[in-house]
Image: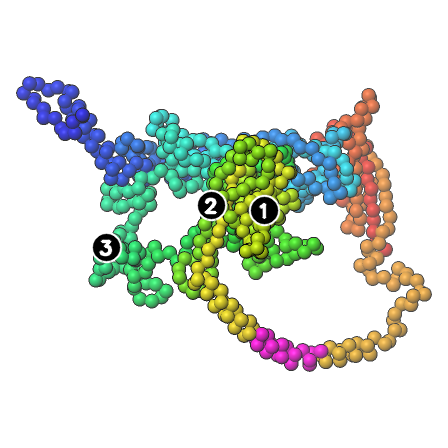
Amino acid sequence: MANNFLQKIDFTKGVKAKPINENFDLIQNWIDTERLHSSGWGIVSGFEFKRRGDEFIIDISSGELVNRAGHKIILDSSFVNVGAPQAIQHFEKFVLNKNGEINLRFPVYVPSQLKQINYIAGVQGELPDIKEFRVYDLETQEIIPVASINKQIIHIIDPEVNNGKAVGVLYYYASSHIDTITYNEKTPELYPKYTYGIFSSSPSLPDTKTFENQGDIILGWAYWTINEEGISVKFYYDNRNVRPIYVDKDGNIYLYGKLYSKTQRRFIYFVQPEIPEPNDLWYDSDSNILYIWRQFNGEDFQWVPVNEHSTMDLHETKLFVPDENLTDEQNEKQIFIFDESDTNLFFIPRSNSLDVYIDQGYIMKDQYVEMVMLKEQDSNGRHLIVPDSVKYKMSDIIKGVGFKLNYALNEPTVVQVNVRHTIKKGKESGVFQRAAIFVEEKRIIYNEDSFPNNTRTIKLPTSYEYGKQQLEVYLNGIKLHNGSSDEIDFSEVLPVPTVDNPNPTLTNKFIINNNIKLKYGDRIIYRISHYVWSYEQLESIITNAQEGIKETKNLITAVDKKYKTITDVMEPAIQKIQNSVSDLKESTLNTDNFIKRSEKITKSMLADEVKNGLFKTMQEYEITVSPANTIYPLQHVLNQNQISFVLLDPYVDSNSKIDNANIKTILNYGTDYVYVDNNKIKLSAGLIRNTRKLRFMVISFGA
């Protein structure tokens, strides 16, 4: 057993290093142990992050921490060079439809611009170079002109002309990621340690246990986001490894890394004080309630409960598991809707009721949008299910039914959602909720002894209410559907009537249907949910109904009064309209200036603005152009009452081979050419690589 006290050193026999060092080591051990016992290990202060301008460099301020051994460590300011995001080239094939729309798997990213593209021809943005993005005909290799690019949605020019063409799209994409900045106790020379997170359209926070097992002290996270505005970064410090309590040299107290100001310092009394001060705390052990002395609802100072919860949270969980029998494309990767039978999962929209996890990693709430069911119905009488939007009022929405990721998953994976319901907990007569939910959950191994001859009828030791959605069945972790899906996976067995009970409601059996593959060794898990209601809650039904009848009666009275008021106002207004119609009939009896059906309409009868819009002439001609010159005279004079098209003919070399880079196409004004002095055309440099024909089509309008 090691000594835990200082050794007495006799210097009369000389000075020896060993006992002195042993005393020093013991004192250091006392200090380190006291640090850990009093306030724990972790960050004391500092370690703030800041991006250096538009560079991919993160500056880290100096900081102080205590490691797991209790040693105090002070680190100077430092930085880490993250580097630009990795751009991945991707290729996809499509057959164009009559709308000319292409929906890519990923948003289009342009490495030279360091952002996702948002482009509208001639209006917004810049079309990427063909090395970074191009849409082309797979048969002729001809470049297909693009009208717009919005993230992963592309629209092409002349969709009707290109309808049915097989095209390829070559583009780049880059994903957002959440990276972790740490200090590693085992390799302090590598500080700061920077660990890249998973690159995904919906990144999640990394698992902190992995870093703690490696001896890392987490300083914070860098969330790199890529969108049409560019590349931005947000820094997060929540849940980093901060020291629980720290007092600096000036006597300031830090609680979990945050300054506890002097104005906040108050005592916690265990006996009610006679003269409390603002923000004093009193713990009433009789009621197990913590009170704070403060003003409340505009009234005088009083003891206000801090932890008296009039509500409680009820949590429900659902796993969306990829179907192994479906392909990656067939499995859902973006929109996740609860089944109609999952009534316990429906939630109140816009109440922060959802927590979503992808591969067990929590994702930020700005990475998805709630899916809601509207009161509005389609032509088949079904309620519309759409992503929630500010354009919908709460009165337009029935309930929340799921969520949609902002970007689809790269591949099918397990998605977990936790739904949090807040329900009332007190004994008020106006409360109406389920008092308790009792869930029985057991596992059954499907074997030959219990289920001979591959019988699919499963008998349970507990009964449940038939047709009330109390039974849930899972086969090898995958939930089976019952009653509301297109294909029923299992069926509840109808209870058998008896003489004593001709209308039974309870059953203890269910059948796994033949469309489900079932073999010996499979795991069957069943859950039975029972709901119990209190007398007070049933009483509240009557109270609420009575109040509803009273409100309806008052509403009918108010509507009746309003209808009478509207009638008094509308009758004179209707009479006034009838008088106006009579006056209009009298004023339109004179038809001298009307044109008869037998007469021909001549140009002189038309207004000038109509004449100016009539087709007049069409002029066509061509000129020869070469790489030696970019400016050529026009054979027509430009004016505002004409439309001109400029086309570039294909070039054929001596081997009768068409130069695919210069297939005949309509040139774009402003990009490929401009007009000079209204009588010349100037071509873009590099547009012409061989002697070509430039064809003009000029359509004039006017009288």
For residue 201, which quarter of the picture? Answer: top right
- Is residue 72 something that shows in the picture? yes
Looking at the rendered structure, the kind of residue marked 3 is Phe
Which residue type does callout 2 highlight?
A: Glu
Secondary structure state at the residue bearing disc 2: strand
User: Residue lying furthest right in this view?
Assistant: 598
572 magenta-colored:
yes
Pinpoint residue 212: horizontal percent, then vertical percent: 37, 32
Kind of residue at badge 1: Glu
Image coordinates for residue 174, horizontal then vertical, percent: 56, 34
Q: Quadrant of residue 478?
A: top right
Q: Secondary structure at mark 1?
A: strand
The residue under the point 65% across, 56% down is 377
- Does 17 appear above or below 625? above
Can residue 629 be seen here? The reply is: no
In the picture of the structure, the residue carrying the numbered disc 3 is 270
The local crowd at label 2, few if under 14, some if 14 to 19, many if 20 or more residues have their Cα within 10 Å, is few
Residue 438 drawn above or below residue 224: below
| Image: 8 above or below 242 | above
Q: Which badge, 2 or 3, comes first in the chain's sequence?
A: 3
Q: Nearest to the eye among marks 2 and 3: give it.
A: 2
Query: What x and y, as percent, mark residue 90?
Result: 62, 31
Residue matched to label 2: 440
Q: Which residue is mark 1?
A: 492
Within 10 Å of disc 3 (Cα), the crowding (few <14, some 14-19, many 20+) is few
Where is residue 678? Give x, y as percent: 76, 44
- Which stretch appears magenta? 556-574
In the visual, does 675 lie left or right of 25?
Answer: right
Which color mode does the image show? rainbow
Going 16% across and 29% down the picture, which residue do you hit?
4
